[in-house]
């Protein structure tokens, strides 16, 4: 018997939005019924998300989501550090490109030819030679 979205979330100890994201991303197969409600087969769901241990197994155990939050925080901090490092590399590249651009602009300005003198009409040429 397939789980509804709420039942699937409760069976795994996660939020409904987590299960829905997994369905939409293709991690878990799910189907919609005619009423628009999602249904997930238990075997398919537990292939990705392990079932929650029984409450009788122990109440002083750390909640499942707590370790996930710590891991997610560590991963987010690592990705932030990588992004900051990449940003500093890109800023350095941009500064190099700007200095290259300025050097090329200066060289182009030095090498530009002066504007040509207007050509003399044949009357002016005749007067200047005579």
Image (spheres, grey):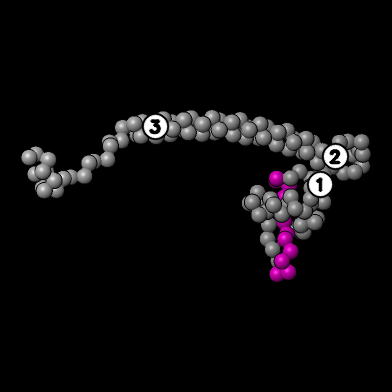
- Closer to the chain start, of discs 3 and 2, is 2
- Closer to the chain start, of discs 1 and 2, is 1
* Residue 20 is one of the magenta-drawn residues: no
Q: Nearer the viewer, mark 3 or mark 1?
A: 3
- Closer to the chain start, of discs 3 and 1, is 1
Q: Count residues near mark 2 (Cα–Cα under 10 Å), then give few for <14, some for 14-19, many for 20+.
A: few
> Which residue lies at the image location 82% right of the left edge and 44% below the top edge?
52
Is 28 situated above or below 64? below
Q: Nearer the viewer, residue 117 or 25?
A: 117
Q: Count residues near mark 1 (Cα–Cα under 10 Å), then give few for <14, some for 14-19, many for 20+.
A: some
Is residue 45 visible to us here?
yes
Question: Marks 1 and 2, Cα distance to the nearest angstrom?
Answer: 9 Å
Residue 106's label in the rendered image is 3
Is residue 29 visible to us here?
no
**Which quadrant holds the C terminus?**
top left
**CB under 8 Å between callouts 3 and 1?**
no
Q: Nearer the viewer, residue 93 or 43?
A: 93
Dot 3: element: helix
Question: Marks 3 and 2, Cα distance to the nearest angstrom?
Answer: 65 Å
> Which residue lies at the image location 76% right of the left edge and 43% below the top edge?
50
Which image quadrant for residue 7? bottom right
Question: Marks 3 and 1, Cα distance to the nearest angstrom?
Answer: 66 Å
Residue 62, percent from left and from top: 86, 36
**CB under 8 Å between callouts 1 and 2?**
yes
What residue does disc 1 label? 13
Is 1 situated above or below 124? below
What residue does disc 2 label? 63
Residue 96, percent from left and from top: 48, 30
Q: Which residues are the magenta region? A: 34-48
Dot 1: element: loop
Q: Nearer the viewer, residue 114 or 72?
A: 114
């Amino acid at each position: 018997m397939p789980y509804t979205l709420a039942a699937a979330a409760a069976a795994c100890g996660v939020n409904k939005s987590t299960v829905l994201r997994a369905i939409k991303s293709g991690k878990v197969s799910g189907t919609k019924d005619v009423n628009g409600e999602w249904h997930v087969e238990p075997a398919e769901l537990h292939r990705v998300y392990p079932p929650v241990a029984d409450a009788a197994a122990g109440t002083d155990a750390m909640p499942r989501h707590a370790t996930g939050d710590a891991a997610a925080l560590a991963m987010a901090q690592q990705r932030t550090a990588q992004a900051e490092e990449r940003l500093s590399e890109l800023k350095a590249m941009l500064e190099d490109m700007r200095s290259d651009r300025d050097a090329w602009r200066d060289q182009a300005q030095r090498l530009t030819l002066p504007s040509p003198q207007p050509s003399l009409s044949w009357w002016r040429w005749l007067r200047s030679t005579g």
